[in-house]
Amino acid sequence: MDFSTLLLTRQSVRRYSEQPVEPEKIDQLIEAVRLAPSASNSQPWKLIMVTDPVLRDQVARATFSPLVSFNKFVPQAPALAVLVIEKAKIITQIGGRLKDRDFPLIDIGIAAAHFCLQAAELGLGTCMLGWFDEPTVQRLLQIPKNRRIGLLITLGYSSDAPPPRPKIRKSRKEMCDFNRY
């Protein structure tokens, strides 16, 4: 699949089939994250793939509550990816302080994009989640308390039939200027 088609194909999936994700495809996703670029090559992430059905269900249930119901689709996903923010190299930390930039957050965004685009190329669906009960997920996955979870990503085969939904985005004029703001 060429890159332009891949960009049009990738979308947030909120309905999954029960078909499990093949281990070789999970390996390709891990490699896509491993190869993602990062500031000073810090690679400030730890990827945790949650594939055990019982644990996956527990983590999935930590993404919604009776008051916050918009993630109720998460238990359908056969796998979850958890991106934990790790310490960046000292040069990246210094640069981040000097430039008032949180490079590890930028870096995990790039890693997550690699994951989601690779998944789409493999025929898999994903949805990035920023809303979850972080202490519960940390406890379930034995993540040290001095680490933050950047994102959770659902993973599986979409139960929606292709083609993808039309993408609703700002116009090019709204989102891009040349040579000045």
Image (spheres, rainbow, N blue to C red):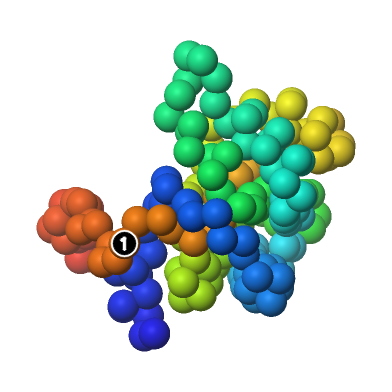
Q: Nearer the viewer, residue 89 or 119?
A: 119
Tell me the residue at 34%/68% (across/down).
9
* Residue positioned most to the top: 67
Tell me the residue at 55%/54% (across/down).
18
Q: Is 158 placed left or right of 50 in the picture?
A: left
Q: Indicate the quadrant where residue 133 lies.
A: top right
Q: Nearer the viewer, residue 108 or 69?
A: 69
- Above or below for 120 versus 136: below
Q: Position of residue 125 (x, y in %)?
A: 47, 60
Q: Secondary structure at mark 1?
A: loop
Q: Is 11 placed left or right of 55 in the picture?
A: left
* Quarter of the N terminus within the rendering: bottom left
Tell me the residue at 43%/58% (across/down).
158
* Residue positioned most to the bottom: 2
Report whether residue 106 is seen: no
Q: Is 160 placed left or right of 38 in the picture?
A: left
* Residue positioned most to the front: 18
Q: Mark 1 sits on what residue?
A: 161
Tell me the residue at 49%/55% (across/down).
17
- Above or below for 82 versus 178: above
The residue under label 1 is which amino acid type? Ala
Q: How many marks?
A: 1
For label 1, count other residues whose C-alpha is less than 10 Å away and answer few (under 14), some (14-19) or many (20+).
Answer: few
Report whether residue 118 is seen: yes
Q: Position of residue 123 (x, y in %)?
A: 46, 72
Q: Position of residue 41 (x, y in %)?
A: 71, 68
Q: Position of residue 112 (x, y in %)?
A: 56, 58
